[in-house]
Amino acid sequence: MSERTYKVYAIENGTVIDHIPTPLALKVIRILGLGGEGIMTIGIGFRSKTHAGGKDVVKVENRVLSPEETDMVALIAPDATINIIKDGSVLEKRKISLPSEVRKVMSCPNPNCATNQLGVQGHFILEDRNTVTYRCRYCERSTSVNPDNLVHA
Ligand SMILES: [Zn+2]
């Protein structure tokens, strides 16, 4: 976390998601289902030593995201870092890892799957961490996740 990033707009309490590759900040917000619940600050295209194309930062005020929520970020930004801020200080630096199960934001690529035919909610089980591949619990079809094939994102 660079000093400069914080200077833009520091928050007193809440969650900072840093090191999101540009331009995925808005997708991260959609994956988390955030919006309409208070102040959010979005920074896009900061210079970054680790991300040649720049990095985005999302700050969610007055809301501490759960580990289950922040792990969802790993679906598209596995190197993102999570800082929980309390009274202006970093209370927790959290690493994220791919969720073992995903019930939202993914859709099954199999058009005949019950999730597509009957509107059953999707349920995907992590199959391969390296390739970010999940398997549909209903039809067993595998799908590798990328920022472009997540629904509602
Ligand atoms: Zn399926």
Image: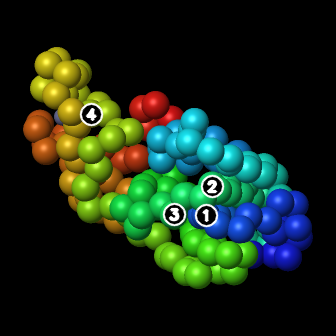
The amino acid sitting under disc 1 is Gly
Beta carbon at label 2 within 8 Å of ligand 1: no
Residue 71 coordinates in the image, percent (x, y): 42, 62
* Badge 4 element: loop
Residue ID at (56%, 48%): 28
Q: Mark 4 points at which residue?
A: 108
Between the C-alphas of marks 4 and 2, the distance is 30 Å
* Residue 7 seen in this snapshot: yes
User: For mark 1, what is the residue?
Assistant: 14
Compared to 34, does 52 lie above or below? below
- Residue 16 image-quadrant placement: bottom right
Q: What separation in Å lies between label 1 and label 3 (alpha carbons)?
A: 5 Å
- Callouts 1 and 3 close, C-beta under 8 Å: yes
Question: What residue is rendered at 47% in x and 41% in y?
Answer: 33
| 1 or 3: tag closer to the N-terminus | 1
Please state if 87 lies on the left or on the right of 147 as rendered.
right
Q: Is residue 36 left or right of residue 142?
A: right
**Foreground: 128 or 125?**
125
* Ligand 1 is within 8 Å of the C-beta of the residue at disc 4: yes
Q: Horizontally, is 147 left or right of 49 in the view?
A: left
Q: Are marks 1 and 2 in contact (CB under 8 Å)?
A: yes
Q: Earlier in the sequence, mark 3 or mark 4?
A: 3
Q: What element carries label 2?
A: strand
Q: First in sequence, mark 1 or 4: give its number.
A: 1
Looking at numbered disc 3 in the image, what kind of residue is underneath it?
Val
Label 3: which residue? 64
